[in-house]
Image (cartoon, rainbow, N blue to C red):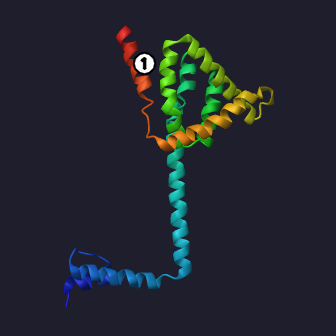
Amino acid sequence: MWGNSYEQGKHTGYNDGTMGGMFGKREYDIAQAQKESHLERHLRLEKEKQEQEKRERELAQKNAQNNDSHKVICTELHRQGLMSRADYALGADYAREHLTERHYRGYHAWAIAVVRHMRRSKRATAFWRILAQARADHIAYLYGDTARRNRFGALLCAVGYPACYLIGGLIGARDWQTLYEQDAAQTSKHS
């Protein structure tokens, strides 16, 4: 009744776009599903799920490694020589392990404006340096440096991370890279 396209679909699973091919493919799919046992199907789906999760983890890790500058305030402090490389790197490691893209979105909603203000005001820079150093001390404490225990830094993290996560769920992504493109353009202008 449907001709060659039905037979081709029924035996190979190829749908050539005709009604016969569509029905043939449907019969092929039903036959394949019946051949696969329940256990085999469960194992196959579980393996596919694990592979997908692994790909997502690798992608997230790659994005995090490429985006250490998501930490715009610490990056600015480090750029100005007001934060040590060790504290900067430890903060980047902590962020990579514990924070999500949603945290970063919320953080960038306000931190980009803060960095612009820091570039114009030494007082603002000094204020944010105190906060960033308290956070850096707390992170160092979390990684085992008991001499750097900082309760103010712990409070900042306890309040700041959930706040950034909440804000990140309400807004879209901000382009933090413009901070550095503008800086490069100003440097080349003065040269």
Give how far across and how far down residue 96 sits, in percent.
59, 39
Residue placed most toward the observer, 51 or 102: 102
* Left or right: 138, with 95 as reference point: right
Mark 1, Cα crowd under 10 Å, few <14 / some 14-19 / many 20+, is few
Residue placed most toward the observer, 95 or 85: 95
Give how far across and how far down residue 107 sits, in percent.
53, 34
Q: Residue furthest bottom?
A: 1
* Left or right: 152, with 58 as reference point: right
Q: Quadrant of residue 46?
A: bottom right
Q: Quadrant of residue 187?
A: top left
Judged from the image, the secondary structure of the residue bearing numbered disc 1 is helix
Rendered-image quadrant of the N terminus? bottom left
Residue placed most toward the observer, 102 or 31: 102
Q: Is residue 88 above or below residue 6?
A: above
Give how far across and how far down residue 153 sits, in percent.
70, 29
Give how far across and how far down residue 41 sits, in percent.
51, 76
* Residue at 54% across, 57% down: 53
Q: What number of labels is visible? A: 1
Q: Is residue 23 above or below residue 170?
A: below
* Residue at 77% across, 34% down: 144
Q: Residue furthest right?
A: 147
Q: Is residue 63 above or below residue 188?
A: below
* Residue at 50% across, 59% down: 52
Report if residue 51 is visible in the image.
Answer: yes
Amino acid, disc 1: Asp
Report if residue 191 is visible in the image.
Answer: no
Residue hosting label 1: 183
Q: Is residue 96 above or below residue 114?
A: below
